[in-house]
Amino acid sequence: MDKKVGFWINSRRVGDLSRLDSIKAWFAERGWQVLPEWRSRPDKIEFLLSFGGDGTFLEAAREAAPYDIPVLGVNYGKLGFLCEVEQDGVIAALEKILRREFVVERRLMLLASLGLPRDARRHVALNDVVFNRDLRESTVKFRVCLSGEAIASPPGDGLIIATPTGSTAYSLSAGGPVVSPDVEAIVLTPLAPHALAARPMVVSAGEEITVTLEKGDRCHVTFDGGDKTELTQGETVSVVKAPLKAKLLRLELRGFQRMAREKLRDR
């Protein structure tokens, strides 16, 4: 067996893991080795299968990016916008992959740094970096700069900095635009701003975005809805385009426009 595939499994979503036995058997019949608990291991795998929801997919894509490994998402969640395949379509999708009927999309990611450069804490996000007021604060206000130049930033509940991939997540629900994933851009979407003129912005991916908590004792910063840290007044987070890109394995006949139409239709 010289070809390997990795599994990234959210057991809470999948439930009974024996549900994946038929997929493992399918690979074994074709001479593939399955690594059922791949976790940033150096093993050379052809691609990574994510079993869960969008959160699981985001984890897998971030971890696989340094190894240049593409990821295919199998949806065991609710919306599953990032997941390419539903549960009942896995085998059909895998047959297409072995026939090489797919494309690999390279997606922009964000690198967020907190603190002084020498000892900064760094986080990578494929979807977004979100600043939310603490429940003890009525509003928060940030000083937001694009490559050193301040922009208007009214008080409110917070701010979302999203990639095109993340434009269809929290940013969209807050009134942000849907951005095609092949556009090199970053979206800034205010959360409940206290100003009628406040609107989302789409800026170049080459900008360095700095966010300083100007008013309010503290706020919370999350990265892809997972890792969380606290920002206190006067502290700054710097957000730039990450040096790595995530690789998403897509079936040829299911482009972004079709997926957006299917997943974002009224329910």
Image: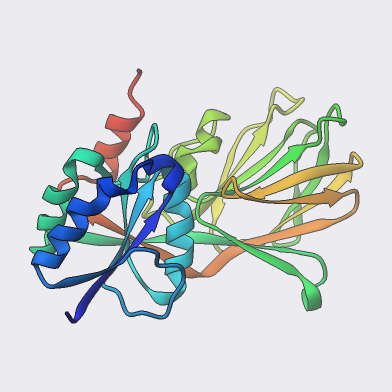
Residue 251 visible in the picture:
no
Going 47% across and 66% down the picture, which residue do you hit? 63
- Decide: is 194 above or below 10: above
In the displayed image of the protein, which residue is found farthest to the top? Answer: 267
Q: Is residue 31 left or right of residue 166?
A: left
x, y (%) of residue 118?
80, 78
Question: Where, by quadrant of the figure, is residue 132 drawn?
Answer: top right
x, y (%) of residue 5?
27, 68
x, y (%) of residue 70?
32, 65
x, y (%) of residue 34?
26, 67
- Decide: is 15 above or below 99: above
Going 45% across and 38% down the picture, which residue do you hit? 168
Going 16% across and 56% down the picture, which residue do you hit? 94
Residue 198 visible in the picture:
yes
- Decide: is 104 above or below 155: below
Colouring convention used in this rendered image of the protein = rainbow
Nearest to the observer: residue 200 or residue 104:
104
Question: Where, by quadrant of the figure, is residue 27 drawn?
Answer: bottom left
Q: How many marks?
A: 0
